[in-house]
Image (cartoon, rainbow, N blue to C red):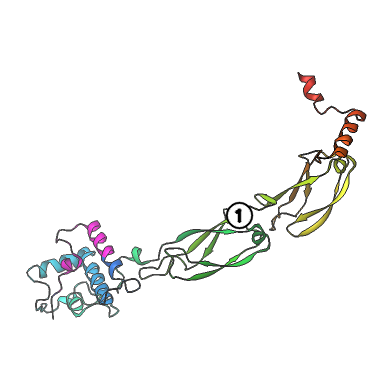
Amino acid sequence: MEYKDYYQILGVSRDVSKDELKKAYRKLARKYHPDVSKEANAEAKFKEVGEAYEVLKDAEKRAQYDRFGSNYQNGQSFTPPPGWGQQGASSGHGNFSNFFESMFGGGAGMGGDDSFFAQGEDVNAKITISLEDAFNGAKKAIRRPNGSTQTGTLNVKIPSGITSGKKIRLSGQGKSGMGGKAGDLYLEVQIAAHLHYRLDNKDVILNLPIAPWEAALGAKVTVPTLAGKINLTIPAGAKSGQKMRLKGRGLPGKEPGDQFVVIQIVTPPADTDEAKEFYQQMSEELSFNPREIIEKVL
């Protein structure tokens, strides 16, 4: 059989340190891993690299290998001494070469660096959704982010009641594992700005314009919510900035948010002679000074 120079296979010197050995192995394992490599002989090279590391990472196997093989060149005809394979023998899985099995009597399998092969890396990305999708829940088809295990589109289920900053975990949709399972994909949710509403965690806030006479006399008005329109009673004497709470009308959940209606009094424009005359009449007939409190301080 042919002698295998494990140091040459990994591209390291015979006095290589344990850390440098691992670094060299990982670099070559990435290069030749069958799941990602485009090399024609990737699988064979990957097994060869794993076998070399299996020997050299183990202090006992490396010492045995160094004692007997220091005078051999890679590819040179090699015959081990009788009984050599009994040293350090273990039940193998048939993944190693005849040279390895003759030297060591089999091995633990092509595991290499177990921590390196355990699992692929997780991938983090962002997904922007509408407020309506956050309220109702939705299914979205998105392009897979860079680093995911596959390309193309991915169907994502948006749970009802999710808030900005929360993450959706998609198992196995991260980076491919090097011999282990793929990592996960974490999508951080961002809720897009809305034309009418704004969010405060699970609470929904709506500015509601009303006329001066509705604020003064009270009124019943129609108010939009994410679940549909409702009728709301404006109390007489309402003021701008006053908040009215609609319990449970915010984002759903175990503890649903509320909707807050913020009253905004809108003054009609004095853009006609009639309107100007009406405002002049009000100023003369109504005894009203909106700056009274401030003037007392001054």
Residue topped by disc 1: 192
What is the total number of numbered labels drawn onto the structure image?
A: 1
Q: Of helix, strand and loop, which mostly describes the magenta segment?
A: helix
Is residue 171 in the magenta section?
no
* Residue at the spot 23% in from the left edge and 73% down from the top edge: 48
What x and y, as percent, mark residue 65? 15, 69
* Residue at the spot 68% in from the left edge and 63% down from the top edge: 136
- Residue 118 position (above or below residue 214): below
Helix, strand or loop under label 1: loop
Q: Residue furthest front?
A: 273
* Residue at the spot 35% in from the left edge and 63% down from the top edge: 115
What x and y, as percent, mark residue 196? 70, 51
Relative side of 258 to 181, left or right: right
- Residue 219 position (above or below residue 291): below
What x and y, as percent, mark residue 234? 85, 46
Residue placed most toward the observer, 83 or 130: 130
What x and y, as percent, mark residue 37? 31, 71
Residue placed most toward the observer, 158 or 98: 158
Is residue 24 in the magenta section?
yes
Q: Residue furthest top?
A: 298
Q: Residues within 10 Å of mark 1 (few under 14, many from 20)?
A: some
* Residue at the spot 20% in from the left edge and 74% down from the top edge: 104
- Residue 49 position (above or below residue 168): below
The residues colored magenta run: 4-27
Relative side of 157 to 67, left or right: right
Residue placed most toward the observer, 284 or 60: 284
